[in-house]
Image (cartoon, rainbow, N blue to C red):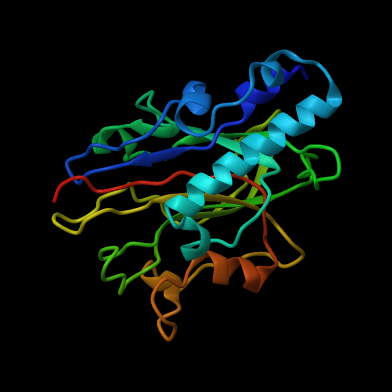
Amino acid sequence: MSILRACASLRTAVFRATRTTPFVGLSTSRIRQHIQPLPTKFWVSKSPKTQRMTLLTMNQSLIDRLKSEEVIPDVVDEFIPSVSIEAKFPSGEEIQLGNTLEEGATQDKPRVTVTPIAVSGQRSASQSKDTKYTLCLTDPDAASRDNPKWAEYCHWLVTNIQQASGILDFKSAKELIEYMGPAPPEKTGKHRYVLLLFENGKSEPQKIDGRKKWGFEDHEPRVGARHYARQYGLELVANYFLCQNKKQ
């Protein structure tokens, strides 16, 4: 894979939204401009060492952005991305880093694809036909970021997903929680909607008891995907996007 192709395939979806719907974000093609400028030689050199440096730099840039949004540590612990995740809604809108989408265009479940981005010395997520994944969409800011009494709120939970040529195949998957599009209430400030992809462990993930706090009612606010993943030995292998409510 050339360095140009490697960088082009590295996509993290970060967008924000309003109840009536503005979602805010940055085009993937503008990662250098909006996240962290990279030396030109990183983009044209075919040196394996340079490619590793580029991917590591891009990964760190993405992690830094997620930390700035406090997705790390609110939703997940720090991790090294080994797979990029891309999502496209039936409306034709794509989730990219910081792009703006209409809420109405995100109400149907998206098609999700994955691309390996691991570098030498880093664990590479398996893409064998036997590998199964769990995908979720979670809101750590329900009812609001200042008052996350229902957080996390599960908007989507699907397990036993397989992939074919990088496209996630939902035909044999189990939808444990039906997809519910982003709908942040009015005057509740910014909401972060986080899309996470996990590689399944030995235990098959089970249905949760409810959307609010992922059914973990006895826990403190902002319990959800991380707690669920630990319960079933799921390994986080992909990036994710954010969402914010602009209607104040």
Name the residue at the front extreme: 39
* Residue 54, picture quadrant: top right
Residue 109 x/y as whole percent: 42, 40
Q: In the rendered image, is residue 232 in sight?
A: yes
Instruction: Looking at the picture, tell me which residue is in the foreground, 43 or 210.
Output: 43
Q: Which residue appears at 35% of the width and 46% of the height?
A: 243
Image spot of residue 234 (x, y percent): 67, 61
Please identify the quarter of the rendering in which residue 164 is found: top right
Which residue sits at x=64%, y=22%?
A: 39
Left or right, 6 with respect to 147, comes to right
Badge count: 0
Q: Name the quadrant of the N terminus.
A: top right
Vertically, is 68 above or below 227?
above
Q: Is residue 206 visible?
A: no
Residue at 56% x, 32% y: name it.
Answer: 11
Which residue is farthest bottom? 218
Whether residue 210 is situated above or below residue 180 in the rendered picture: below
Percent position (x, y) of residue 42? Answer: 70, 21
On the image, the x and y values in percent for residue 176 come to 50, 59
At x 20% / y 45%, what residue is drawn?
246
Frontmost residue, 75 versus 165: 75
- Return the residue nearer the eye: 137 or 5: 5
Q: Is residue 152 left or right of residue 18?
A: right
Q: Is residue 56 above or below residue 144?
A: above
- Quarter of the image for residue 22 reads top left
